[in-house]
Image: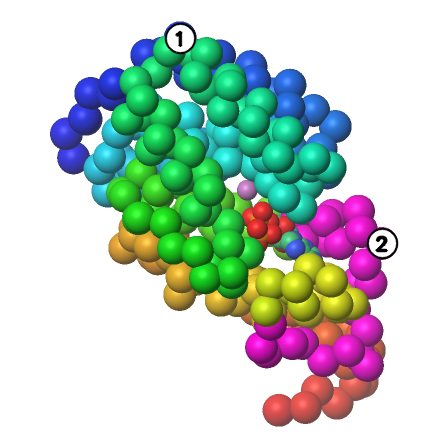
Amino acid sequence: MTTVASSVPSSVLAAAEAYAREKLRGRECGHDFFHADRVRRTALRLRDAEGGDAGIVELAALLHDVADPKLVPDVAAAQQDLKDFLRGTGISSADLLHVLSILEGMSFSKELAGIQAEKTIEFQVVQDADRLDALGAIGIARCFAYGGSRNQLLYDPAIPPRTQMDNKAYREEKSSSLNHFPEKLFLLRDRMNTATAKRWAEKRHAFLVEYRDTFLREWDGEDFEGSVIPA
Ligand code: ADP
Ligand code: NI
């Protein structure tokens, strides 16, 4: 894949990195700057395979959680601050609108609300990278870290995983971190936009399934020596 020259100057990327570091300081550890940085690295690797403007990808990856509605106390203020920051960088208005539409369209919660953003290739790789970071060993750590930050149970056998959810139920009803696996994390593999991310998701998805199976066996002590493991 040939590299597409980016219209985003490197000075803007440096400023966006500094801005993201500052805004994500002290964040719940599954959505901190390290998460933004992993998403940036994965998104840029996906872009190498899938194409797109690297500068737009990097900018959107760095900023994608800065104004996340579930993480900031004042969403309108955080969004305004982000827009002011982007305008102040002097990027073109086309690039500004593109980055903002990626950020607005990205989250799963927005999809539940029925909002459809135009899926440019840059949008697709950043969203795929964010979803890949919710899978695999790191995805498991993030899930329980997030649950812990909300004082959510690890697991409760009396609460079945929800199969149909609207946005309100998704955020407000009591569930458990282990239920988050079938409720959301298991769905991500088939929601990847790009062929490359679909391939990369396979191993991480399989690890989640195996982890949950093991968790449930341990819950009932079926992993102990002498236990009869159901076929
Ligand atoms: P969303 O907008 O759907 O919340 P994010 O990518 O911002 O998506 O957040 C996803 C990360 O937060 C994942 O790693 C996921 O494990 C964690 N997370 C979100 N909601 C929950 C929940 N109810 N229980 C456990 N983890 C959660
Ligand atoms: Ni994210």
Q: Which residues are magenta?
A: 141-165
Residue 135 visible = no
Q: Nearer the viewer, residue 38 or 180?
A: 180
Q: CA distance from mark 2 to mark 1?
A: 40 Å
Residue occupying image coordinates x 58% and y 77% = 164
Picture layout, residue 210 above or below residue 68: below
Q: Is residue 178 left or right of residue 62?
A: right
- Mark 2, residues whose alpha carbon is within 10 Å: few (<14), some, or many (≥20)? few
Report which residue position mark 1 lands on. 11
Q: On the image, which quarter does residue 46 sit in?
A: top left
Q: Nearer the viewer, residue 188 or 173?
A: 173
Picture layout, residue 29 above or below residue 96: below
Q: Nearer the viewer, residue 114 or 161?
A: 114
Q: How is the image coloured?
A: rainbow
Label placed on residue 88: none
Q: Secondary structure at mark 2?
A: loop
Residue 93, given in percent of the width and then of the height, sits at 31, 22
Numbered disc total: 2
- Residue 152 inside the magenta-drawn segment: yes
Residue occupying image coordinates x 25% and y 18% = 7
Q: On the image, which quarter does residue 191 sit in?
A: bottom left
Q: On the image, which quarter does residue 45 sit in?
A: top left
Report which residue position mark 2 lands on. 151
Label the magenta part by its dominant secondary structure: loop
Q: Residue furthest top?
A: 11
Q: Nearer the viewer, residue 29 or 219?
A: 29
